[in-house]
Image (cartoon, grey):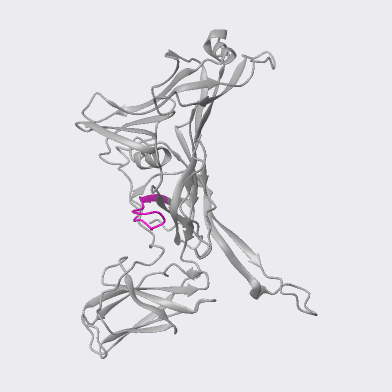
Amino acid sequence: MANLGTGLDASVGFGVESSWNTPATITRFLPFDSDTVSRKKTTVQGMGLRAGILSPFAANRRIATREATGNITMDVQNQGMGLLFNHMLGSNSISNSGSVYTQVFTLGSRRGLSLTAQIGRPSADGTVNPFTYTGGKIVDYELSLATNQLFKLNLGMDFADEITLANTPTISGITQTGTAGSTTYYYRVSANLASGETSAGAEFKTALSNATLSSTNYNVVTWAAVTGATTYNVYRSTTAGAELKIASNVAATTYSDQSNTAGSGSPLGPLLTTPTYTAVASAAPFAFTGANTLTLGGSAVAAVKKFSVKPTNPSKTDRFYLGSSGVKAEQVDNAYRTVTGTLECEFTSLSALYAAYAADTGLAFQFKVIGDYISSTSTPYSVQIDMPKIFLDGDTPNITGPDILTQTVPFVALYDGTNSALTITNVTTDTAL
C-alpha cells in the first residue's frame, strides 16, 4: 500500500457468499470511480416522563435497525465482470472455444445469491480502513456509453450490515508467561453489546511463545474497554488472518490463554484484504472509440451520442423482525423487474426512430461494444446487450434553435413470451465467474 491517506489508496472488492449474510472472502477486486455506500441506522427514543425533567434521557436511546445502501460506479472491464453480471441478472451459462470464454447472462432467480463487498477507505493518517458489507444484493444498475467516455457501470447496492473496526477492542499488549518458545500467535478481540457482537478489532501478534500453552506457559492478552460492552470474545490462530474463537463472554479486559484447544467460528469483520488486480497489460475498459454497434429491428441506428439501459430488481428490503437484533432477512424479489433505457441522438429521418415511436412498434434491440483481440485469436473481447422486444417512448422532435434537431428517446423492454427481456453476453478470457 502507498499509505498516501487519500482516495489513491482506495479499493473495492467482492466475494460470493456461501449463504446469505455470511461474510465471504474477498476474491475479486475491480478498478472503480466512486461509491456512496453508507450505513443506515434507525433509532428509537424512549420518553419516560418524569416530573421536573425537561429533556429525554440519553440512556433511553437505542438503535432499532441497521443496514447499508448506496452506489458503486466503475468502468466495464474486458475481464472480471462476470461475477457482477451474474448478480445483476441472476442466471448464467458459460461455454468456451480454447482460451475464448462466452458468458451469457439472463434474468433468473437471485434468491440465495448474495455478495460480501469490502471498500478500503483511506483516512488522512495513512490508514486504509476496511468497511465490510454483507448480505449484498444488486437492486438496480445502469450500463451506459457516450461520446468521449468509457463504457460505464453504476451498481445500486443493498446490504444487510456494515462492519468496521470502529468501536472495537484494541489489544494493548500480550505478555508471555513461563517458558518462552518460537511459536507466533495472532489474536483479535470483539465486544458483546446490547445490540450484539461487534466486529473483532485489529490483529495483534506475539512471537517467541511456547508451542504448548498450559497453566504455566501461557499468553496474557490485554485490551482497552469498549463503551457499552458487557463481555468480550477472544479469537486466536497461529496464522495471520485466520483467528477462531477460543473464549466467549469474558467479563474482564484481560484473558490468559492457557490451552491449545482449537477454536471455532470466525470473527465478524475480516481484516482488510490486500487488493490484487488482473495485470494491467491484459485488462482494459471498453471505450466509445472502439468498435460498437447499435441496431433496432435489425437495422443500424446512426448518430447516437449516448446509450444507457437501467434495469431494476425490485426487492423487499425492509424484512426486519423481532429477535433479529435489528438485521434484516434476505432481500427477495417482490415485483416485476423493469428494464428501461434512453437513446440520445440526432433526428436523422422519420423512418429512423420516429415511425416506430408513433406506431408503438416493438423492436429487437442489440448493442455491442468491442475491445482488443484476445491474444492469439481472431476473437475480440466484447459485451453485447440484447433486448428482443422494446418500445420507444418520448416526444415528437422539437425545434429549439438553428442547430441540428436532437432526440432523447426513452424505451422500455418487455418479455416477448419466449426470450429473456434482457441478455448480456460477455466474451472474455475468464475461465469462471
Range shown magenta: 12-25
Q: Position of residue 424 (x, y in %)?
A: 38, 31
Task: Name the residue: 35% across, 50% down.
Answer: 16
Toward the left, the furthest residue is 98
Task: Name the residue: 51% across, 43% down.
Answer: 334
Toward the right, the furthest residue is 52
Q: Position of residue 380 (x, y in %)?
A: 30, 26
Q: Which is more toward the observer, 221 or 122?
A: 221
> Is residue 7 found left or right of 382 in the rendered image?
right
Task: Name the residue: 27% across, 25% down.
Answer: 379
Using the rendered view, name the quadrant where residue 274 is placed.
bottom left
Image quadrant containing the N terminus: bottom left
> Is residue 335 found left or right of 99 in the rendered image?
right
Image quadrant containing the C terminus: top left
Looking at the picture, does residue 51 appear above or below residue 309? below
Q: Main secondary structure of the magenta part?
A: loop
Q: Position of residue 333 (x, y in %)?
A: 48, 43
Using the rendered view, name the quadrant where residue 91 is placed.
top left
Looking at the picture, does residue 214 appear above or below residue 182? below
Using the rendered view, name the quadrant where residue 74 is placed.
top left
> Is residue 139 found left or right of 111 in the rendered image?
right
From this viewpoint, is residue 89 visible? yes
* Residue 19 painted magenta: yes
Task: Name the residue: 47% across, 17% down.
Answer: 363
Q: Position of residue 285 (x, y in %)?
A: 39, 35
Q: Which is more toward the observer, 147 or 18?
A: 18
Q: Which is more toward the observer, 415 or 312?
A: 415
* Residue 183 painted magenta: no
From this viewpoint, is residue 37 visible? no
Labels in figure, total = 0
